[in-house]
Image (spheres, rainbow, N blue to C red):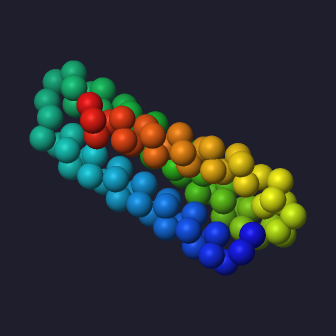
Amino acid sequence: MSDKAFQEFEKTLREVGDKIEELIAKGAEMTGEARKDLDKSIEKLKAKRDELEVKFAEFKKESEPRWNASRDHFENALSEIKAAVKTLFKG
């Protein structure tokens, strides 16, 4: 994997983290069941992001051939997280 690809993936992970922080702030203004639901969704997103960060860090130590074999998995997982964040912002 090229340095540019690593940097792009890391940038996207940071952006997801920033969006999660925005959701946390948004949730602080909410009450009742809506807040509980948002808090649960945020915790799930954080867990997925954290898992992806760990896997990516481990992977980053690997060689480029491994990246070529795993790229789709990481891109799909990241797309799912981004879609979930987007959905939560709409809700």
| Residue drawn at (21%, 21%) of the image | 33
Q: Is residue 74 above or below residue 60?
A: above
| Residue drawn at (35%, 59%) of the image | 18
Q: Residue furthest bottom?
A: 3
Give how far across and how far down residue 64 sits, in percent: 82, 68
Check the picture and name the quadrant holding the C terminus.
top left
* Image side of residue 90 versus residue 13, left or right: left
Count the labels in the image.
0
Q: Residue furthest top?
A: 33
One can see residue 39 in this view? no
Give how far across and how far down residue 25 sits, in percent: 21, 49
Q: Nearer the viewer, residue 80 or 56?
A: 80
Give how far across and how far down residue 51 sits, in percent: 59, 49
Q: Nearer the viewer, residue 89 or 59?
A: 89
Check the picture and name the quadrant holding the N terminus.
bottom right
Q: Is residue 57 above or below residue 90?
A: below
| Residue drawn at (54%, 45%) of the image | 79
* Image side of residue 13 versus residue 56, left or right: left
| Residue drawn at (64%, 69%) of the image | 5
Q: Is residue 6 above or below residue 51?
A: below
Q: Is residue 30 above or below residue 32?
A: below
One can see residue 40 in this view? yes
* Image side of residue 73 versus residue 48, left or right: right
The quadrant in which residue 54 appears is bottom right
